[in-house]
Amino acid sequence: MMENEIFKALADPTRRTIFEKLATGSMNASALRNGMKISQPAMSQHLSVLRNAKLVREERQGRFVNYEVDPEGLTLIARWLGKYRAYWPARIDTLKILLKDMDQ
Amino acid sequence: MMENEIFKALADPTRRTIFEKLATGSMNASALRNGMKISQPAMSQHLSVLRNAKLVREERQGRFVNYEVDPEGLTLIARWLGKYRAYWPARIDTLKILLKDMDQ
DNA sequence: GAATCACATAAGTGTGTGCTTATGTGATTT
DNA sequence: AAATCACATAAGCACACACTTATGTGATTC
């Protein structure tokens, strides 16, 4: 089940930080480390977890590996969230429109 | 930070199952155990984690404790998801309407 | 008010997870 | 082709986590 890998991936604050950085623009693993006080292997391992969770995807560029946000993971979260739309506050009800689209 | 407790809570498959059961209707801790092969203390501990994450809330009813889905947790996830709207596939773009509401 | 019921908390244990250092791999440079 | 660079993988370790059994707590029943 994909959900498990997604939520486990996001359960770690360091990985959420990495994901947030990538959301500001794609970059390689070294660039991601800037200002993060994290070892190179640790970064590599975190990126591996995020990849398996479909939250991030890679693209080889010479000897660099460029990372970017993978929409697939976000879509799966949205889909999970959608299952509980009955419990959303009324002011978020607009989201129903979205979910009708996604159910197909 | 609330996000951490939410994602950690959802990282466990047993807790997601509990949450899903509650989404079908509120019930007490004993009813939740039905067909789940889980000890009473384990259930109690899981519910405690879900409560701290604002995914579930309790309501004392005599010697029973009724549990139900707490919309607050779901809203926080929606808010987190909203930060990355730029990466959603185009067909989910309708959600932008929702987010404009939530930004206030 | 003693027993019972529904649930919470305590304490201990095995497993998972995130980190480290060390080494491997594939691509570029000189 | 040797050295270097960017990144991945291996192995080991400290800690977190989900579980267990045992006990505590607050409400109901007889």
Image: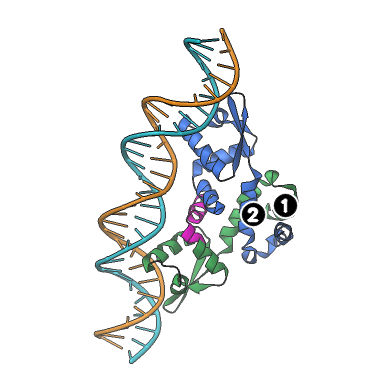
Chain colours: A green, B blue, C cyan, D orange
Disc 2 packing (10 Å; few <14; some 14–19; many ≥20): many
The answer to whether any part of residue B38 appears in the image is no
Q: Amino acid at mark 1?
A: Ile
Q: Is A13 within the magenta?
A: yes
Q: Residue at x 56, y 51 (%)?
A: B2
The answer to whether any part of residue B44 appears in the image is yes
Q: Residue at x 41, y 78 (%)?
A: A63
Q: Helix, strand or loop at disc 2?
A: helix
**Chain bearing mark 2:** B
Q: Quadrant of the C terminus of chain B?
A: bottom right
Q: Position of residue A62 (x, y in %)?
A: 44, 79
Q: Which residue is mark 1?
A: A92
Left or right: where C20 falls relative to B89: left
Q: How many marks?
A: 2
Q: Write down the quadrant of residue A71 in the picture.
A: bottom right
Q: Is A12 within the magenta?
A: yes
Label pair 2/1, CB-CB below 8 angstroms: yes
Q: Which residue is mark 2?
A: B78
Q: Position of residue D16 (x, y in %)?
A: 41, 48
Residue span colored magenta: A4-16
Q: Position of residue B40 (x, y in %)?
A: 48, 30
User: Do marks 2 and 1 share a chain?
Assistant: no
- For the stretch drawn in magenta, what is the main secondary structure? helix
Q: Residue at x 63, y 50 (%)?
A: A81
Left or right: where A14 falls relative to B86: left
Q: Amino acid at mark 2?
A: Ala
Rendered view: B14 above or below D28: below
Q: Residue at x 61, y 47 (%)?
A: B73
**Chain bearing mark 1:** A
